[in-house]
Amino acid sequence: MSNSASSSTTFGCSSSTNNITELKQSVVKNFFIDVQARKPNSWYGKCSICSQGVADTYGTTSNFVRHMKTKHESEYEEWLAKKNINLDTKQRNIDDMIKQKTNKYSSINPRQVKLTESIIKDLIIECGVPLSLVEQNGFKNFMEIVDPMYSLLSRRQITRDKLPKLHDRMIMKLKALCNNAEYVSVTLDVWTDRRLRSYIGITLPTFVGDDLKSHLLSFAPLKGHHTADVLLAEFEKVINYYHIEKKLVRLITDNASNN
């Protein structure tokens, strides 16, 4: 019985090690382009996200992985979660397996990533629930029932890490959408809330398949009087940021006198 258990554990560790080796090699395949061998005994590739060159000893991926972890952490973690590979190479005994049931998920665990994305996208963004939700005891108790191993987010983590990374990913997608479009039309409008704070919003309507979608390019505070010059300056700032000034064929506004 003892020999059988030992053999089984060793096999699991070997399998995990093979998975990690394959995972590290696939980092190069998935995130780097123009990969080529260099003398003596080295290889080099360009990051497909930021175009920075990375070199390492041939067959070694430490520098490539380090670049992804330090420069593109969110993309790397999202990719790891999709791969769903166990990165724990430590040989575990029975005590470790018992402790695992009471431990919390790591930040790259697929279940942890999925629940975190759902909290931010479905509750905070889609339902408009305030960020203070994650600090309330009722929510903490609820998540304990949903999954006791889930590591709760702090409000600070959401505002300083998760939301900025999500925003950056959305901006990249919007830029790609604008870059691929031959012609575009946009809408512009100005709102004032109950506290008399003004905002300017610019959207890009487009078809995704057979469905008409409206993409928010900008929603920003508007200071001063709503003169035509002020609105034009804000509008040009947005279309220049997305490089669509030469693709614009139509601007849609309401019938306000300053439009």
Image: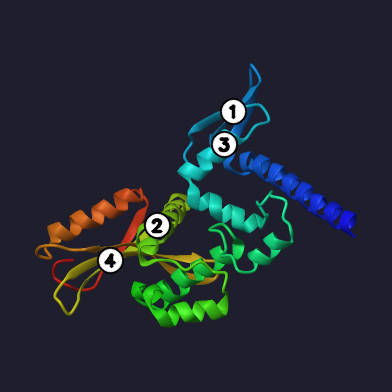
Q: Nearer the viewer, mark 4 or mark 2?
A: 2
Say which residue label 2 marks.
161
Label pair 4/1, CB-CB below 8 angstroms: no
Residue drawn where x is 13% and y is 57% of the image: 229
Label at residue 56 = 1
Residue at the outermost left position: 225
Dot 3 crowding, Cα within 10 Å, few <14, some 14–19, many 20+ = many
Label pair 3/4, CB-CB below 8 angstroms: no
**Distance in Å between CA atoms under marks 3 and 4:** 40 Å
Q: Amino acid at mark 2?
A: Asp
Label pair 4/2, CB-CB below 8 angstroms: no
Q: Nearer the viewer, mark 4 or mark 1?
A: 1
Q: Is residue 48 visible?
A: no
Say which residue label 3 marks.
64
Up/down of 59 relative to 17, above or below? above
Mark 3 or 1 closer to N-term? Answer: 1
Q: Position of residue 68 (x, y in %)?
A: 52, 43
Element on which disc 1 rests: strand
Label pair 3/1, CB-CB below 8 angstroms: yes
Mark 1 or 2 closer to N-term? Answer: 1
Mark 4 or 2 closer to N-term? Answer: 2
Mark 4 or 1 closer to N-term? Answer: 1
Q: Amino acid at mark 4?
A: Gly
**Distance in Å between CA atoms under marks 4 and 1:** 46 Å
Q: Amino acid at mark 1?
A: Asp
Label at residue 201 = 4
Coloration mode: rainbow
Element on which disc 3 rests: helix
- 52 sits to left or right of 94: left
**Distance in Å between CA atoms under marks 1 and 2:** 30 Å
